[in-house]
Amino acid sequence: MKKIAALMLLAALALAGASAAYEFGSSGVTFTWAPMDPLYQEGRAYPFADNVAFRYMIAPENTEYLPTDILVSDNTLNDGKGGYKRLSFRDPDTGNNTYWNLKAAVNAGLFRFAWEDRLALEMYLHGGLNTVFGAYGGVDVLGFDGFYGAGVSFDVYDIVTFRFGFHHFSGHWGDEALNDFYSRNSNSDYSALTEYTRNNSWLFGISIKPVRYFRVYAELDLPQHVGWIRPAAHVPADTIKNTSEESPDANKPLSGYIYEQEGLSGRNNNDYPSSYKAMRIGLGAELEIPVPTVGLAYLAFDMQLHQDGKINLDTLEYEKDRPWDMEYTVALGLSLQERPDMPEVALEIAYHDGRFPLLNYFFQHTRYFSAGIILTI
């Protein structure tokens, strides 16, 4: 409930529209308490961008790309050391290859100080909910995600913008998928279900707009030294359990604790190299073309690199020569926006190759085309 209340507050602030600017004498310094155009813009093609989206997704008629499994732990695997395996909650069916993706999120700027058109400093809040339903049969919900964060953005001459803050990711299995899973696997041998969580990460971003209608950006999502990460196999060796100093578990490695919750208490990640931090790197580029009396047409590209791809989920071992997981999205859209300081509505088609756009299905490679409506507040 706290997450939902915070997101409602973000939406209320973003939709308030009363972003009056106050000038301090003749210094050229202004203060805006809730600007409608945050300094740092989310990547248009990034699947987890903080915007409102309603998309229809079509995957190839190939069961390899369809999410029908849940990742579980099993302490009988790997000669009793334990490991992960996939158990299905429904039979793969090439006819069940369409989905609805609904996302409600905002990226809200707060308390901006600006000096003419040269420098600007702004606090931001962002966050939202993301879910995917099957567009077939009973339209079952496959899962839902929560994400939020806060920090500061700094802009130089409307060309370079930096962002620094914290970021939270958490995945949840859908109730209907779980009902099917438990009905199907009542006699299966497994220890626990896994989940995907990054609570919390440091978020660094840079956006460069050398000309008016083109920009590139890069982001780094770096899990904090003290925090929560799931599944246990993704936990860096030096990550410490998030607890009070008075707790008997204070300053203890996190991986053993999460493995214990997953029923794999004999596991640890002590042999992971110090270079492994479970990082996520995002890279992107966007090109806009003005369309008279309409708005903007845009072409956007986003690539996501996940360091946790170096972990072999079959053996739960770090593999030096194993590549990072890579995914990319290409989007083509038409923005219907009257003014830059107003919410943007866009019609968009896109192609995605990589992880399924629900956090708990990080292990599921997919490809799909999508068409939808995007609202950026």
Image: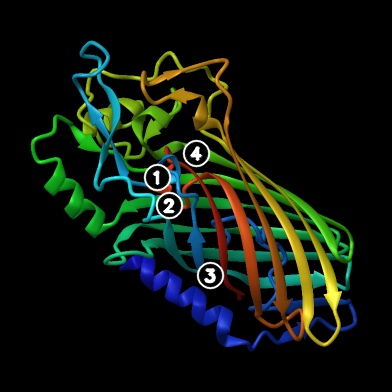
Q: Earlier in the sequence, mark 4 or mark 3?
A: 3
Q: As displayed, is residue 167 above or below residue 228?
A: below
Q: Where does residue 46 sit, x and y in percent of width and height? A: 61, 55
Q: Residues within 10 Å of mark 4 (few under 14, many from 20)?
A: many
Q: Give the labeled residue for mark 4.
A: 224
Give the spatial CA distance, label 2 vs label 3: 14 Å
Q: Amino acid at mark 3?
A: Ala
Q: Where does residue 200 sit, x and y in percent of width and height? A: 46, 46
Q: Give the labeled residue for mark 1.
A: 361
Q: Give the labeled residue for mark 3.
A: 53
Q: Relative to residue 112, is residue 131 drawn left or right?
A: left
Looking at the rendered structure, the secondary structure element under dot 2 is loop
Looking at the rendered structure, the secondary structure element under dot 3 is strand
Tell me whether the residue at label 1 lies in contact with that at label 2, contact meaning CB atoms closer than 8 angstroms: yes
Q: Where does residue 224 sit, x and y in percent of width and height? A: 49, 39
Quadrant position of the N terminus in the picture: bottom left
Q: Give the labeled residue for mark 2.
A: 358
Q: Nearer the viewer, residue 285 or 260?
A: 285
Q: Earlier in the sequence, mark 2 or mark 4?
A: 4
**Which residue appears farthest toward the left when viewing the image?**
187
Q: Residue at x 22, y 23 (%)?
A: 265
Give the spatial CA distance, label 1 vs label 2: 6 Å
Q: Residues within 10 Å of mark 2 (few under 14, many from 20)?
A: many
In the picture, residue 196 is in which quadrant? top left
Q: Nearer the viewer, residue 123 or 191?
A: 191
